[in-house]
Amino acid sequence: MKKKKLEKSKRSQSRIKNWESRYDEAFSKDSFRLRRAEVHLPDNLSDTKLPEIFEPNATVVSHSKKWAFVILDSSTDTKEIQCKIDERLREKDSSLIVPGDRVFLDYEEGGEPIIRGITPRKSKLSRLSVDREGPPEQVISANVDILFIVASVKQPSFKPGLIDRFLIIAENGKVEPVIVLNKIDLNKTLPEEINIYKNLGLKIILTSCVTKQGIGEIINLLENKVGVLAGHSGVGKTSLLKCICPDIDAITLEVSQKTEKGKHATTNTHLYCLPNGGKLIDTPGIRSLGFWDIDPRSLDYYFPEISKFSAMCRFNDCSHIHEPNCAVRDAVKRGDIPLVRYESYLRIRKSIEQDGITPGRFKKENILPKDLSHFHKRNHFK
Ligand SMILES: Nc1nc2c(ncn2[C@@H]2O[C@H](COP(=O)(O)OP(=O)(O)O)[C@@H](O)[C@H]2O)c(=O)[nH]1
Ligand SMILES: [Mg+2]
Ligand SMILES: [Zn+2]
């Protein structure tokens, strides 16, 4: 018993030491868990309890090293409030606070604004965190209605790999995907692969920040909805945001002056309010996108044209890679499943297996039945 206790205290001492030595680096990485160690607990904890039932009164627009930035529901403009996060709100497997989160903003005795409650997320866009120290599920944004997967026809050239990954992330997070093909002014001929997504019934909007083609369509979709712009760096996400809401320059300037840091948030993901009641979240460019809770054995479900055939495979748990009598590979050979999408399936399956088991993976409920009649009704795929 004694030995155990000693080990425990040694461990905690070394944790403190590590924490100190990593302090600067951790903060520069914007590690939420460590960051909140700065916020001290009140002395008489028993007197103060976090509210169990609360009405959210604000939306998170971004967070930086130590702070969350929110817009109050009662606010008539887009004034952002810088606030602390109650340290008793614990981060578990998933990011604690992200743009789009609905929160309860309270005030400390001294009048300092502080977040005391976060509502469960109705929908979310999540990825496997690249930061090994933080929670494994990195939520990009919460309570999102539409994911605009932005690609460009030229500069950079069209790369469908990330689109396939984002389609999975949208499906998994209960978010409707829309493909935005930008810089259409640079090349009128559309990439061939775009027909594959058209055939899946996905909405595709052709846009140009130069001619303003398609901008109105995005604005209409966003009425009273929350949208996210995501895609490779340089495809024109921020330019689209500025076309959609030309006042945004002023907003970013105002905020950076307030934080006196030049940049508003280390995460860079930021929610902006549109005049039509819509909200749009801009995200930094993404190079690689790992999945945090997709089981490789149910990956085919996320490819509607593959899952259409997988029920006819000889083996119920067919991976569609090497098994005999695989209806999926037969369909690829016949041309009923586009080869690029099958190749994408193989690549993604391999990368999920390489990522290894994450806490959200291999959950029983992630394994979907092979019987197609049980599949959820997806309204974005026709
Ligand atoms: N020709 C053309 N250039 C664009 C368009 N949209 C963005 N760009 C340019 O592409 C570059 C990258 O844009 P940016 O919005 O920063 O991309 P982001 O990294 O996705 O946010 C900038 O030089 C923009 O001026 C477009 O529709 N047509
Ligand atoms: Mg950008
Ligand atoms: Zn198969």
Image (tube, helix red, strand yellow):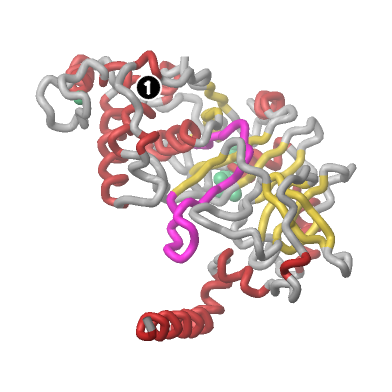
Q: Nearer the viewer, residue 378 or 281?
A: 378
Q: Is residue 328 on the magenta stretch?
A: no
Query: Between 227 and 88, which is closer to the camera in this rendering?
Result: 88
Q: Give the x, y percent position of residue 120.
A: 62, 42
User: Quarter of the image holding residue 262?
Assistant: bottom right
Q: Which residues are magenta?
A: 128-151
- 58 left or right of 347? right
Report helix, strand or loop for mark 1. Answer: helix
Q: Quadrant of ligand 1?
A: top right
Q: Which residue is mark 1?
A: 304
Give the camera-side residue of 222 and 364: 364
Mark 1: amino acid: Pro
Q: Residue at x 82, y 42 (%)?
A: 73
Q: Residue furthest left?
A: 324
Q: Which picture quadrant has residue 263?
A: bottom right
340 displayed left or right of 118: left
35 versus 318 height, above or below: below
The residue under the point 78% across, 66% down is 47
Which of 244 and 279 lies nearest the eye of the viewer?
A: 279
Evaluate whether residue 370 shows in this view. Answer: yes
- Figure quadrant of the N terminus: bottom left
Ligand 3 within 8 Å of disc 1? The answer is: no
From the top left corner, tell me how far across and down residue 275 is, in percent: 81, 34
